[in-house]
Image (cartoon, rainbow, N blue to C red):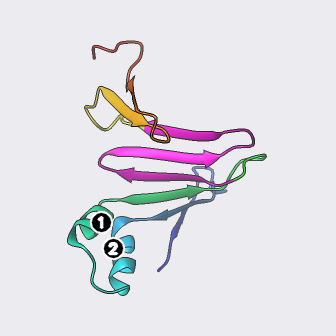
Amino acid sequence: MTTSIDPSEDGIGDGQRTLDGQQLAGALALLGPADPVCVEVLTRLNLRVYPGEPGDRSAYVVLDVHGVSIGVKRRADDLYLHADTTETDDRLIAFEINGYGETDHHTNPSNPGL
């Protein structure tokens, strides 16, 4: 399996590595019979990995699935999570951390009615 490396507009490259859903599903198939639900999700998933910035403890990993991009990286003093829902019509994100119950977050806090 190969990954692609995307160059930046200036040609230098930002170090982004990508695996698309077809590659991930193909890798799963090599392991033997797979659950059809898992295969369906994997074929629609995109994985991007960017090198960490100075001081980060990990690379920045982004999963694109269900029209949403979820990014995560371990920075020097915290865990950074990013959710991008601009390609969906979702108005509210309900999320949970460590089993302590859901918290709702409007996708447009300046206009929650949108």
The quarter of the rendered structure image containing the C terminus is: top left
Query: Who's the residue at 35% across and 66% down the image?
Result: 21
- Mark 1 residue element: helix
Task: Choose between 75 and 108: the one closer to the eye.
Answer: 75
Q: Magenta span covers which residues? A: 58-83
- What percent of the width, then of the height, locates residue 79? 62, 41
Task: Choose between 83 and 78: the one closer to the eye.
Answer: 78
Query: Who's the residue at 36% across and 78% down the image?
Result: 28
**Disc 2 marks which amino acid?**
Ala
**Is 44 part of what is drawn in magenta?**
no
- What percent of the width, then of the height, locates residue 69? 41, 45
Q: Is 48 placed above or below 38 here?
A: above
Query: Who's the residue at 33% across and 73% down the image?
Result: 25
- Mark 2 residue element: helix
Label at residue 43: 1
Label at residue 69: none
